[in-house]
Amino acid sequence: MKTMSLCTCVLLMISSAFPQSETQLLNWLQRFPTADSDGDGKLTADEARAFMVSRRQGRNGHGPPTEFHVDPDWNKGRFPDNAICYMTPKDIQTIYREVFPKDSQPVFQVPKPKKALRIVGTGHSFMAPGYRTFPVICRAAGFDQPLRTHTGGGITGSARYKWEQENGIFEFAGKPKPKLLAAIATGAWDAMMWGPYYADRPEYYTCWIEFGLKYNHKMEFYLSDAWPSLRHLSPTPTTEEELSAETFVRLDKEKDAALEKLIADLDRKYPNKVHVIPTSDAMVLAVQAYYEGKLPGIEGINRWLCGKTYSIWRDKLGHLGPGFERLEGYVFYATIYRRSPALIKGDIPFKPLVDKRLGKLDPPRKEVDRLFRQIAWEAVINNPLSDVTDRDGNGIAD
């Protein structure tokens, strides 16, 4: 008998262990609500698989992979001829219906709203909190936000991974899942959002851009800059006393240097089309506010270090602590709609926060929520890559 490779064994273990029936998926959603990466209230088999992979990685202390195999055919300049992106819009929708038979009445396009942009997006667990709160914020601002996402945990939510998966190419050969391509091909979507990933290359984004502009030449694109985490520190700190506001400012600047090169490459080819969503800048401003005593009710920087529930981050990988999903959503809103969230009047009816171990959690205090709105706007207008300025200080972009 031939000996199976370790990789094969792991894949078999994962494929056999994750839930597949509707009942199993429902039970998993109740046990692990964060596995629902797109926040739509339904857990898919893909989301369950991605959650299990990231959970195993987290237990081993590794987190999402920072080094990984990339198919060499990315260097060819053209994808395999059977890639979904080369098909007609009608054929792409036919493939979608075959792949997602339970979606009996798929909505590939929505009427153009008066105020909102129709947005599609990929992303990982750093994007998921903002995807959940962004539509709630928009509703409070007076309009509904059309948002169609295809997300996954860690590497499975990266722009490269989703392009391969949607097109059914490389490791997904013969298994396309064109959730976004079927929509984009209608020409009825105005913007696309992504979360960044390790070792990003311009071509992981140009493929999406080219496809989007093919069907809507006015389409705009937004790349979140994510935020620094304890993984970026060596050695890893063991107490919060080893951290300071300056620590995160330095990490933010180091990360921005790599992002600036990527955006510069994209800007040369697509002038004024690609914009940065400065979530990292906002989180660093929140860290500074914490050290200045301006975040009452926030108990620490990272729960993994201090053990405090109400911390800015909850683990070594950098997932947001309770309440900070609002800040990310405010940054999304401020960047895309070029308006300060501080102009939104009154409280916003966000869903209650629930921790699977601790139960219902307290929301941020009102003064903290208001500061989040100010921080979001400050981060956006002070980052030149957002392409948003507010010279007269009225909270509306110039």
Image (cartoon, rainbow, N blue to C red):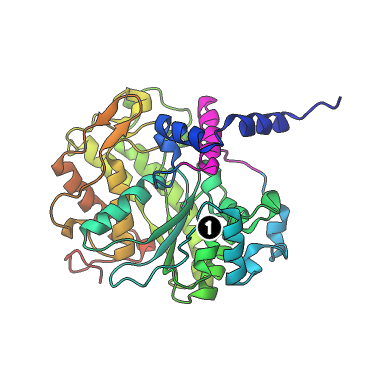
**Viewer-proximal residue among 297 and 128:** 128
**Which region is colored magenta?**
43-68
Residue at 61 percent of width and 53 percent of height: 165
Can see residue 193? no
Pinpoint residue 158: horizontal percent, then vertical percent. 53, 50
Disc 1: which residue? 179
In magenta segment, residue 235: no
Q: Is residue 182 above or below residue 3?
A: below
Q: Is residue 164 above or below residue 7?
A: below
**In the rendered view, does 99 fall on the left or right side of 235?**
right
Quarter that holds the N terminus: top right
**In the rendered view, does 337 fall on the left or right side of 158?**
left
**Viewer-proximal residue among 281 and 83:** 83
Residue at 13 percent of width and 52 percent of height: 346
Can see residue 248? yes
**In the rendered view, does 323 fall on the left or right side of 223?**
left
**In the rendered view, does 146 fall on the left or right side of 345?**
right
Q: Is residue 155 above or below residue 53?
A: below
Pinpoint residue 162: horizontal percent, then vertical percent. 56, 53
